[in-house]
Structures are given as C-alpha cells and as structure tokens.
Image: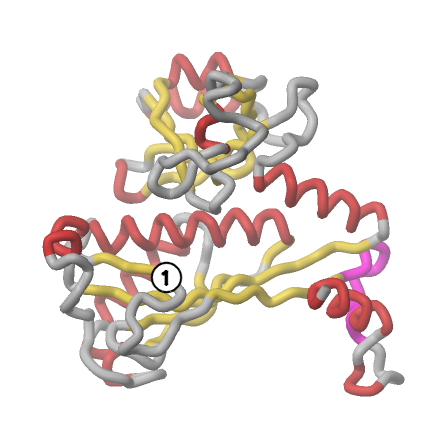
Amino acid sequence: MIEADNLISQYESEGINRVKLGFTDIDGVLRGKYISLDKFKSIAAGTAGFCDCVLGWDMDDQLYDNVKYTGWHTAFPDAAFRVDLATERRLQDENNLPFFLVEFVADDGGLHPICPRSRLKHILGVAESMGYLPRLAFEYEFFIFNETAQSVREKNYTDLVPLSPGNFGYSVLRTMTLSDLFNEFMDYCLAHDFPIEGLHCETGPGVWEAAIAVDDALAAADKAVLFKTFAKAFFQKRGMIATFMAKWSMDYPGQSGHVHQSLLSREDGRNVFFDANEPHSMSATMHHYVGGLRR
C-alpha cells in the first residue's frame, strides 16, 4: 500500500512544488486541476471537495436537463473526492510533475452514486463476490490533422488537412516516413503507464489505431481514459490535433473504440470463458456473459 507520507517526502526531496489531479466526469472526459504540494499534504491521506457541477454538465459545460443529482436546485455544492495514490504518473512534458487520478466518494466515504470510477468499482465488487476477475484491453482508432484548436474553428471544421492523405491501412511506408512521430508517441504512452502493444495506420487519411496492453479492469479503464486525453495533448503540443469522434465526416470511414474482455477465476486464474467440450469452446458462463451484454 502506498503511503502518503512517503510520497510527500519524496516530492520534497525532489523540490516538487505542485501536483496535478484528474477525474472522469459522467461523459468520460478527464477534468482536474493543479494543487500546491501543501494542499496535497492536507488531502493525500483523506478527502477533499470539488464542485459537483462537473457531474451535471456536458462536454461544453452546459447543464443537462432534468438532472436530479446536481443543478441550480442544489446550488452546486462540493462533492468529496479521494486521491488514488496508486495511480501516480510522472508527466514527461512537465518536468516529471506527479499526476494522480481521483474519484468522488459518498458522504460516508463509500462509493459515489454517479461517479464513473465508483460505478465501475461497484461492478467489479459484484464480480469479485462471484469469484471472477475481469481483464480488459481497450483499442482506439483516431484521426490526426495538421491543424490547431484555433484553425479548425476558423475553418468551421471543414477542409481539414489530415496528417497523411488517402487510404492506406497497415501501411509500412507511412510508419517509416513518420517513424519519429510513431516511436515518440509509443515511448510517451509507455512513460505514462498506458503502454501500447500495437500501433498502425488504419484505413482513412491520417487515421491511426492503438491497442493498449491488457490489465485488470480498473487499471485498464484508467489507462483508456488517460490515453485519450494524453494523446490529444501529445499531438496538440506538436502542432496537430487528434479526434476520437466516431465519424467526423461522411466522406470518410468511421472510426471505432472497442474493448477486449476476459473473465478469469479468482481461485485459480483459469479462463472461465473457455470450455473445450462445448461448441466453439464457449463455456456456459461465456454464453451468459454475452447474453448480458446483448440485453
């Protein structure tokens, strides 16, 4: 178990004056802020508060209609959050600044009713009580443009210039031509603890596809959230933008994000989806699992 005092002592010895915190809102968007090391000292082993408006508005900071948890009717009070010290990353572009994921908690310190990370932990708790260990691996396709956040708005999101023209899925030529960028991006992801096990060009102008390495479900979900925001920041700092929109233009193929799922026995680590004696080696558990997803 990671002790807050040990981390703080380490930061003081390194001359670190602040840390960055991030959490996932109800749309899966990573939000957060910098806090001073003194502030971090006061909350690292306990909880702190953050305005709960972030649990009631959309990606454009517009309030959702007919919400019950928060809104003008509640006056947007602070919601308690807790820093997950096990999620520490060192930000390579910010002089090794510490970064942590946080999660909202209920008033009694338990799981929060609508915080996405709390909801996932609830489901994983159910799986654990049934003797299962879920393992996940996320895979994302995304378009990269030789544009900036300002230029796309000036163009009204039309006539955007892709990183590379035309269709060329799994192109070795493009990965060699852009090898510096490909390798730098993979090193960047590895340094921030969401390593990519596969990266290639997909069909479409400027489309890449990245497969994040498998992990236990909570860690895998954390890595998926971090990957999308950190990837956008990586390209923006280099004069480009990346979008994970499912279909940014009717003129080009859509792009997807999907999750590979495994279910292991907590007792012996065996794959409970597998049964050599059943058709297609699909166990009864796997049939029920797929049925639950389809429902």
Question: In x, y percent, where is residue 109?
Answer: 67, 22
Question: What amino acid type is highlighted by mark number 1?
Answer: Met
Magenta stretch? Answer: 264-274
What residue is drawn where x is 57% and y is 41%?
Answer: 116
* Tag 1 secondary structure: loop
Q: Is residue 137 magenta?
A: no
What residue is drawn where x is 33% and y is 54%?
Answer: 231
Residue receiving disc 1:
245
Q: Is residue 265 magenta?
A: yes
Compared with residue 191, is residue 90 higher up or lower down, i.e. above or below?
above
Q: Characterize the local packing of mark 1: few (<14), some (14-19) or many (20 or more) Cα atoms within 10 angstroms.
A: some
What residue is drawn where x is 58% and y is 36%?
Answer: 115
Residue 147, quarter of picture? bottom left
Q: Nearer the viewer, residue 163 or 171?
A: 163
Which corner quadrant holds the C terminus?
A: bottom right
Compared with residue 12, is residue 219 higher up or lower down, i.e. above or below?
below
| Res. 5 visible in picture | no
Colour logic? secondary structure
